[in-house]
Image (cartoon, coloured by chain):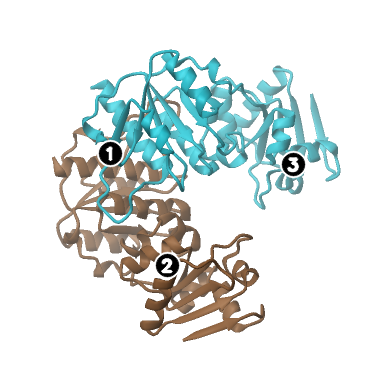
Chain colours: A cyan, B brown
Amino acid sequence: MRREITGFSNPTVKYLRSLREKKHRKREGKFLAEGLRLLTDARESGRLPEMLVMALGRDAHPLLNTLEADVLEAGGEVVETTPDILGKITGKDNPQAVAGVFAEFDTGITSLQRDRAPIWLVAQALRDPGNLGTMLRTGDAIGAGGLILIDDCADPFSVEAVRASMGAIFTQSVAQANWPEFLEWLRGGSGQLVAASLRDALPYRQAPYAAPCFVMVGNESRGLPQEYEDACDLRVTMPMRGRADSLNAAVAGAVLGYEVLAALEG
Amino acid sequence: MRREITGFSNPTVKYLRSLREKKHRKREGKFLAEGLRLLTDARESGRLPEMLVMALGRDAHPLLNTLEADVLEAGGEVVETTPDILGKITGKDNPQAVAGVFAEFDTGITSLQRDRAPIWLVAQALRDPGNLGTMLRTGDAIGAGGLILIDDCADPFSVEAVRASMGAIFTQSVAQANWPEFLEWLRGGSGQLVAASLRDALPYRQAPYAAPCFVMVGNESRGLPQEYEDACDLRVTMPMRGRADSLNAAVAGAVLGYEVLAALEG
């Protein structure tokens, strides 16, 4: 179905804008992704938006034509609107010419298939959606199965996280669980839980990593609770040659993730 | 000197607020850093603010007392103001209880001492201040000498970059140059320029890194221009197991930087 919207007060505009807020995303079970590149990544990963929103008067683009045709063929909706309204939806002065509404995925931890990949990333109380999206992007790069979010993390379906993931939100599994749920699931099968730690740890370049390896990073300000570190199968230490005693959380996950990848592929 | 300010229209408040904007920072040659942790890192690195701004009615803290005494002893100024005004200065609803004004450092490339460290990070047209600050933080961790900013990068003295650096802005050298200036400086001494590349590259785990090693990453959207890649002494490739062909810029610099550190320390 195809529609044109030219009024700011249209209920669809209100609906789309509301998806910038977590409570509305959760109520609707939908999220927004913006930009032709991101939507093309989604399409090529087998995910089509339920609703495609495009600016009237946009430049033609073959990838956009393909996207539009695929959405219509799949029974989705194509909405054309003014650049002003699109800017109001995306919250940007200079909006990209296209946005899409997707159904949020199942993020139940019990639906993860741990044997699908040798590495999984785990984040505990990660508060910054940019860090979260960056971890998804890194996970895609190292061939991880997905990102497991422990305790109260940023919303992986926020516009900022989706953007920072550079499309990896469509290829990586995402699971959410509290710490006891995660531990119970983890210990119900094989899996090595690894974290960077300053206590009782092996050098990260010489540690006996084993698949499936779960690489865990902690909150941006507080790091991991000691109890969580204690539950790890392996604690590793990374060089800290300067004044600081920690890395940015997404950076720590990436350096450790790449090390695990190299070790497993030996 | 010690002063109390309780009026929003006070010229000092206007001055402090103006430092959130790049053009005012450049005119004044000053920048803002916020939070007791950051200011304590600065003090311990031998950098004291010219002006220390604290909230009236704040909780007492021994580190804050030390900071205050040191600033006064060094001839600096201590300003006490209301939490409302401090919030207006820092642009936050819930401001940290302290902020400091620092003189911007010399960022001329010719003042860098390349032999001071085995690794240097280099960023080209890096636009995100959070990425820039994260690279400073990573540089501190790997024992880099500093961060060299090529072409039109985000301002290293922006509040966001300073915050993301977690104090590394006070320990890492920062230099700014355009590409010809940088190349001329680089080739005027020893130094290996390395970048991640998809073309004509060696696996990053098996490359002959040599100190002083300059690890370069490109712009967030476009990567490095081909001409810049061609000028590198070493191009390396990192595994990309998924759909994407690149990492977040700060992540790429960190993974490569840690690899260089491990290789140089053998």
* Both labels 1 and 2 in a single chain: no
Residue at left offset 64%, top offset 23%: A48
Tag 2's secondary structure?
helix
Say which element carries label 1.
Answer: strand
Name the subunit of mark 1.
A
In this view, B163 is above or below A185: below
Between the residue at mark 3 and the residue at mark 2, the CA separation in whole angstroms equals: 47 Å
- Mark 3 or mark 1: which is in front? 1
Report which residue position mark 1 lands on. A237
Residue occupied by mark 2: B62
Q: Which amino acid does label 3 sit on?
A: Arg
Q: Mark 2 lies on which chain?
A: B
Residue B156 visible in the displayed image? no
Residue B141 position, x and y percent, is: 30, 50
Q: Residue A174: give x, y in percent of width and height.
A: 53, 26
Residue A262's x, y, as percent? 27, 27
Q: Name the residue under label 3.
A: A17
User: Residue A197: x percent and y percent?
Assistant: 33, 39
Q: Which of B1 and A165 is in front in this view?
A: B1
Note whether A177 is above or below B17 in the view shown: above
Q: In this view, does A210 lie to the left or right of B189?
A: right
| Chain assignment, label 3 | A
